[in-house]
Image (spheres, rainbow, N blue to C red):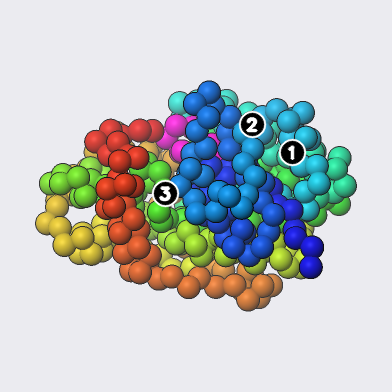
Amino acid sequence: MNKVNALVTGADGFIGSHLVELLASKGYRVSALSQYNSFNNWGWLEDINCKDKIEILTGDIRDPHYCKEIVKNVDIIFHLAALIAIPYSYVVPNSYVDTNINGTLNICQAAKENGNIRVIHTSTSEVYGTAQYVPIDEKHPMQPQSPYSASKIAADAMAMSFHNAFDLPVTIARPFNTYGPRQSARAVIPTIILQIANGIKEIKLGDTSPTRDFNYVEDTCRGFLAIAENDQTIGETINIGSNSEISIGSTFDLIKELMKSDVKLVTDKERIRPEKSEVFRLCCDNSKIHNLTGFKSQVDIREGLQRTIDWFTNPNNLKHYKSEIYNV
């Protein structure tokens, strides 16, 4: 059997680096795109266990000419490259348009011009905004509650327009809240773990009442693979989630229990989103992905958090983070 040539954009990031490892383990020939920088740093690709089995590219999806070059001889594109920090999108919204919308346009145009390459475009549950009903299925209205969310709604529409207008074989994969090793310290689970691991006695968090559908990163990546390997998913938007929800406060309590900590919770006003921008409830209806592919999450929240704690509390991993600084 011929190997499938896969391009992963955003491969240097949290989910992207795990997806590269999964694809390589399944026999894919992987080209992993890391954002170009003068330090020649490959992000989390520096830490993966299969560097000798993949090709690492450095560049930028904001350049359409570059995108057309890197998709040549590719069978499938997993498009994960994006700006994802919600608070940062309040500060530099135009950058989110450039990377998330125009970057997606560049990838889809390049795929179209190189033989209609299969594209798995990455969305986010943030496009739904606060749940109008739960669990949230793919028909739930879009609510742009942040510039980040707005940019992803537009990027999703751009990707799907290429399917409708040009028959590009696109699927929109819409993961809910993914967590696990290598996640940014901006995210709530690493924030809690890192502060406890560094001996801080009062944990600073924003609003702890919102609920999230947390998915361990290996499950999210398995969801991407299930979507990619099933042609029935072409032209569809598909949630990847666990169909369960837990509040930020309860997540804090569970991490505190697993880490055997007596830490106290303090509300940090700097970490609270503007009122109309906070997404108060997310819970995934995952019946579509299960019906189409048979996929369902395998790692429950307790096991996933324990694996995440074990990784973050390893000194070799802890040194990558500045847990004392709140980075938007």
Local SS, label 2: strand
- For the residues labelled 2 and 1, say whether their Cβ atoms are less than 8 Å apart: yes
Local SS, label 3: loop
Residue nearest the observer in this picture, 215 or 228: 228
Q: CA–CA distance between discs 2 and 3?
A: 21 Å
Query: Where is residue 66 shown, x and y percent of the image?
Result: 73, 30
Residue at point 16%, 62% (across, down): 260
Q: Which kind of residue does numbered mark 1 sit on?
A: Ile
Query: Where is residue 309 shown, x and y percent of the image?
Result: 30, 58
Residue at point 40%, 71% (across, down): 300
Q: Which disc is residue 59 wearing? A: 2
232 displayed left or right of 203: right
Residue nearest the observer in this picture, 96 or 298: 298
Q: Quadrant of residue 310?
A: bottom left
Quarter holding the C terminus? top left
The residue singled out by tag 3 in the image is 182
Q: CA–CA distance between discs 2 and 1?
A: 9 Å
Q: Quadrant of residue 252?
A: bottom left
77 is higher (above) or lower (below) than 254: above
Query: Where is residue 147 shown, x and y percent of the image?
Result: 53, 35
Q: Which disc is residue 70 wearing? A: 1
Q: Which kind of residue does numbered mark 2 sit on?
A: Gly
Q: Residues within 10 Å of mark 2 (few under 14, many from 20)?
A: some
Res 8 visible:
no
Res 254 visible:
yes
Residue lying furthest front: 52
Which residues are the magenta region? 82-89
